[in-house]
Image (cartoon, rainbow, N blue to C red):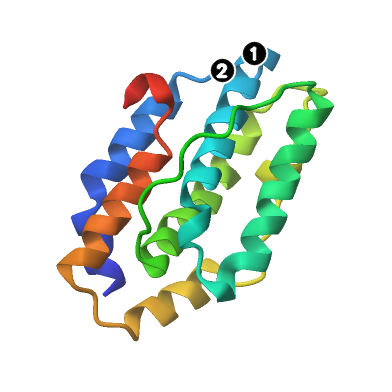
Amino acid sequence: MHDRIRQATRAAHERVDAAYAGFDLATRPGYVDFLQAHRKALWRLEPSWRPVDRAEFEGLAASLDADLEELSAGTVRPTAVACLDGLAVAYVTRGSRLGATILRRRIGRGLPGRYMHHPLTLTWSEFTRQLDQVPLDDAVIADARAAFAAFLPTDHR
């Protein structure tokens, strides 16, 4: 099932990757914009977090908030998206941590990196094993696409 959701959401994933490619993480303004966009995404998706993910995702959000606070950068809380399937949201949120391992090399010297280095207890391979145990229907895939869209910066929506 992991392969099915990956294939079905490839275009949405590529759109998010392309949107973030323009952020210069080596500069304070570019990094702040990146962090603020991610914070908004987590807020949008929070109502759909599965109970099993909540503590880890709250820790992730706290790391992000600490980085924004250190940078003296606030973020306006956006409206949450309609409730999505929690597994779909977990797929996108947990998958974002894989991207973070690549992107964190681009963070400028002296900029905080709590969010980009924040580990999740459940590894990606453990999560995909869980995912493979669940039948995925079209609604879950549609919700994964919507979760990817929640990560799009406002100017890319």
The residue depicted at 78 percent of the width and 25 percent of the height is 111
**Is label 1 in a helix, a strand or a loop?**
helix
User: Disc 1, disc 2: CB below 8 Å?
Assistant: yes
Name which residue type carries label 2.
Answer: Asp
The residue depicted at 56 percent of the width and 27 percent of the height is 34
The picture places residue 47, in percent across and down from the top left corner, at 49, 57
For the residue pair 145 and 44, the one nearer the viewer reads as 44
The residue depicted at 29 percent of the width and 34 percent of the height is 15
For the residue pair 3 and 40, the one nearer the viewer reads as 40
Please name the residue that numbered disc 2 is placed on.
24
Q: Is 120 left, or right, of 125 in this rendering? A: right
Q: Nearer the viewer, mark 1 or mark 2?
A: 1
Task: Tell me how far mark 1 sits from mark 2, CA to CA.
Answer: 8 Å
Tag 2: Cα neighbours inside 10 Å, few (<14), some, or many (≥20)? some
**Image quadrant for the N terminus?**
bottom left
Name which residue type carries label 1.
Answer: Pro
The picture places residue 71, in percent across and down from the top left corner, at 78, 23
Q: Which picture quadrant has residue 108?
A: top right
Res 14 visible: yes
Residue 29 disc label: 1
Q: Is 100 left, or right, of 7 in this rendering? A: right
Marked residue nearer the N-terminal end (1 or 2): 2
Q: How many marks?
A: 2
Q: Is 9 left, or right, of 52 in this rendering? A: left
Residue 71 lies, with reference to residue 121, above or below; the image says above
The picture places residue 53, in percent across and down from the top left corner, at 57, 69
